[in-house]
Image: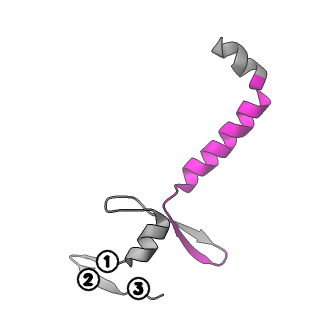
Amino acid sequence: MELKLRKAGNSLATTWPKEILNRLNVKEGDKLYVVETLHGVLITPYDPKFETTMDIAKRVMARDRDALKALAK
């Protein structure tokens, strides 16, 4: 698939095909994140910092399950 860059003021913009936007489950106003990988660039609607934070939170919750359960009472 090819996307063409066009001038929009002092920036560049591109138009995305509806099929790709549907697959990404995004709409106007949503944010997309650009992540550099070993194989190029990944564009995703998921915030990679949030993913990392959630992974850490899951590990902490698993490790301190009993303490968190006691605090919840």
Label 2 to label 1, Cα distance in Å? 6 Å
Quickly name the residue at label 2.
7
Pick the residue in front: 24 or 34. Answer: 24
In percent of the image, x 56 and y 51: which residue is there?
A: 49
Identify the mark at residue 59; answer none if there is no mark: none
Residue 35 is situated, as x and y percent measured from the top left of the image, at 55, 66
Vertical side of 41 occupied by 44: above or below = above
In percent of the image, x 43 and y 76: which residue is there?
A: 19
Residue 59 is situated, as x and y percent measured from the top left of the image, at 74, 38
Amino acid residing under circle 3? Leu
Amino acid residing under circle 2? Lys
Q: Are marks 2 and 1 in contact (CB under 8 Å)?
A: yes
Whether residue 18 sits left or right of residue 55 in the image: it is left
Q: Is residue 61 magenta?
A: yes
Q: Secondary structure at mark 2?
A: strand
Crowd rating for badge 3 (residues with CA inside 10 Å; few <14, some 14–19, many 20+) = few
Residue 32 is situated, as x and y percent measured from the top left of the image, at 44, 63
Residue 16 is situated, as x and y percent measured from the top left of the image, at 38, 77
Vertical side of 50 occupied by 64: above or below = above
In percent of the image, x 38 and y 75: which residue is there?
A: 18
Label 3 to label 1, Cα distance in Å? 10 Å
Q: In the figure, residue 9 lies in which quadrant?
A: bottom left
Identify the mark at residue 13; answer none if there is no mark: 1
Amino acid residing under circle 1? Ala
| Magenta range | 38-65
Closer to the chain start, of discs 3 and 1, is 3
- Closer mark to the observer between disc 3 and disc 1: 3
